[in-house]
Amino acid sequence: MHTVGLILQLLRPNASMARLAALLLLPVLIESVFSISFFLPVNSRKCLREEIHKDVLVTGEYEIGEQPNTKTNLKITDSSSHTLYSKEDATKGKFAFTTEDYDMFEVCFESKSPMGTGRVPDQLINLDMKHGVEAKNYEEIAKVEKLKPLEVELRRLEDLSESIVNDFAYMKKREEEMRDTNESTNTRVLYFSIFSMCCLIGLATWQVFYLRRFFKAKKLIE
């Protein structure tokens, strides 16, 4: 949070600096926006997957092209098959949910029609998903808290900075976990190598004594 405070202190005197910071952080904002359009054949199912961090607000808006005698269902689930949003015979709408844990989320569209494939044109589906900072409605926040445009931009940058700090913290945690795993694996490999060498040395020693007794029994050696 010290980083966020420093950014705010630097940006308050000058609106142009706020806009410059927004441009510098634009690539991070783009990663929080997911828009796609595709055609869904009749009697088929298509799913889109995305990994999202814990405690992140996710919003989305979808629009499905209408086709006669065709019903399209929308379902959003996590890796444990928990349903986060479900809509039967969906045509157009919005959805929102907050993630409870870092997970892989799946958005599925399924088309059903009594008519066979090829008799009905494919449906055009438009999906726009946002999460994190981009999912927040800063216009509503500005109205409720009576913020000026520059203050809204500063709030947006503050939230974005906090999101970046959280991402780096998560990456650091994953790096530590991977390092611990590598060290544990290396230790196990070392112990296994030592055990294998001891077994080979023991087996070789046993073979020498066994062959020595065998040759003595056959009176081949004294």
Image: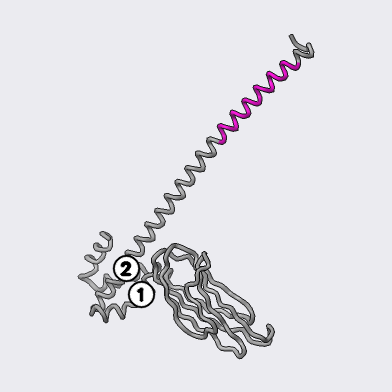
Residue 92 numbered tag: none
Q: Is residue 20 left or right of residue 190?
A: left
Residue of label 2: 159
Image coordinates for residue 10, horizontal then vertical, percent: 23, 65
What kind of secondary structure does the magenta stretch mostly adopt?
A: helix
At x 51%, y 70%, the residue is 77
Q: Is residue 204 left or right of residue 186?
A: right
Q: Which residue type carries mark 1?
A: Lys
Dot 2: element: helix
Image coordinates for residue 222, horizontal then vertical, percent: 74, 9
Residue reaching furthest front? 82
Which sits earlier in the primary sequence, circle 2 or circle 1?
1
Q: Nearer the viewer, residue 117 or 18?
A: 117
Query: What is the quadrant of the N terminus in the image?
Result: bottom left
Asked if the residues shown at circle 2 and circle 1 are in contact, with their CB atoms under 8 angstroms apart, the answer is: yes
Q: Is residue 189 above or below residue 19?
A: above
Q: Quadrant of residue 203?
A: top right
Q: Which residue type carries mark 2?
A: Asp
Residue 136 numbered tag: 1
Give the CA separation, mark 2 to mark 1.
Answer: 10 Å
At x 52%, y 85%, the residue is 91
Image coordinates for residue 12, horizontal then vertical, percent: 22, 70
Q: Nearer the viewer, residue 207 or 89?
A: 89
Dot 1: element: loop
Label 1 crowd bin: few (<14), some (14–19), many (20+), radius 10 Å: some
Residue reaching furthest top? 222
At x 56%, y 77%, the residue is 109
Taking the magenta stretch, the answer to whether it contains residue 32 is no
Please provide the residue range marked out in magenta. Answer: 192-214
